[in-house]
């Protein structure tokens, strides 16, 4: 990266709050306090996300969307539960939710995109059906 590239990137916000159809949606690469996903920690339990839910609440948001972990399909984290969904269409719960979606990038996992229907409060994960990369034998050790 050039010096100008780094200066541009340093000025970017770590998150975005969108107002769409009466919904305030929190968008980030990962969960608070690591919104850019620089640590190696991966959230797996709802109780680990208390700081994230408190942070999005402070921004008057009920819905948060991220995609750092490159999961297949979608994960819905609420303050009390976590559910995994494949590439399908799902109705959002009536509780605060952190939606963790698939990666667009091609890798060793099924990649995809998500489409959020704000009027009906549904989200759909759609696979891109890219050929998965194969890890070299030395990486499997």
Image: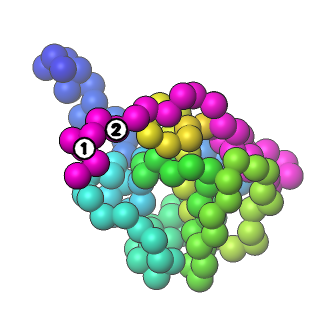
Mark seen at residue 46: none
Image location (x, y in percent) of residue 90: 78, 57
Q: Residue at x 50, y 71 (%)?
A: 53
Q: Is residue 88 covered in magenta?
A: no
Image location (x, y in percent) of residue 46: 51, 77
Q: Residue at x 20, y 26 (%)?
A: 6
Q: Is residue 129 covered in magenta?
A: yes
Residue 95 location, quadrant: bottom right
76 sits to left or right of 94:
left
Q: How packed is label 1: few (under 14 Cα within 10 Å), some, or many (20 or more)?
A: few
Mark seen at residue 139: 1
Q: Which residues are magenta?
A: 113-141
Q: Residue at x 43, y 52 (%)?
A: 69
Image location (x, y in percent) of residue 52: 44, 68
68 sits to left or right of 78:
left
Q: Are marks 1 and 2 in contact (CB under 8 Å)?
A: yes
Location of the N terminus (image quadrant) = top left
Q: Secondary structure at mark 2?
A: loop
Q: Is residue 45 above or below residue 9?
A: below
Structural distance between the alpha carbons of marks 1 and 2: 6 Å
Residue 12 visible in the snapshot: yes
Q: Secondary structure at mark 1?
A: helix
* Of 62 and 22, the residue lying toward us: 62
7 sits to left or right of 83:
left
Residue 4 location, quadrant: top left
Direction right: furthest residue: 120
Direction left: furthest residue: 3
Residue 135 location, quadrant: top left
* Of 12 and 98, the residue lying toward us: 98
Residue 97 visible in the snapshot: no
Circle 2 residue: 135
């Amino acid at each position: 990266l050039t010096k100008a590239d780094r200066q541009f990137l340093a000025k970017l916000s770590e998150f975005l709050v969108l107002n769409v159809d009466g919904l305030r949606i929190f968008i980030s690469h990962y969960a608070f306090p690591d919104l850019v996903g620089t640590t190696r920690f991966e959230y797996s339990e709802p109780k680990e996300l208390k700081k994230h839910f408190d942070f999005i609440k402070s921004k008057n948001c009920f819905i948060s969307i991220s995609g750092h972990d490159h999961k297949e399909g979608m994960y819905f984290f609420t303050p009390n539960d976590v559910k995994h969904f494949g590439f399908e269409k799902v109705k959002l719960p009536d509780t605060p939710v952190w939606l963790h979606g698939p990666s667009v990038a091609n890798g060793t996992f099924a990649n995809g995109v998500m489409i959020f229907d704000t009027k009906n409060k549904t989200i759909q994960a759609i696979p891109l059906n890219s050929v998965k990369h194969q890890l070299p034998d030395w990486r499997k050790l």
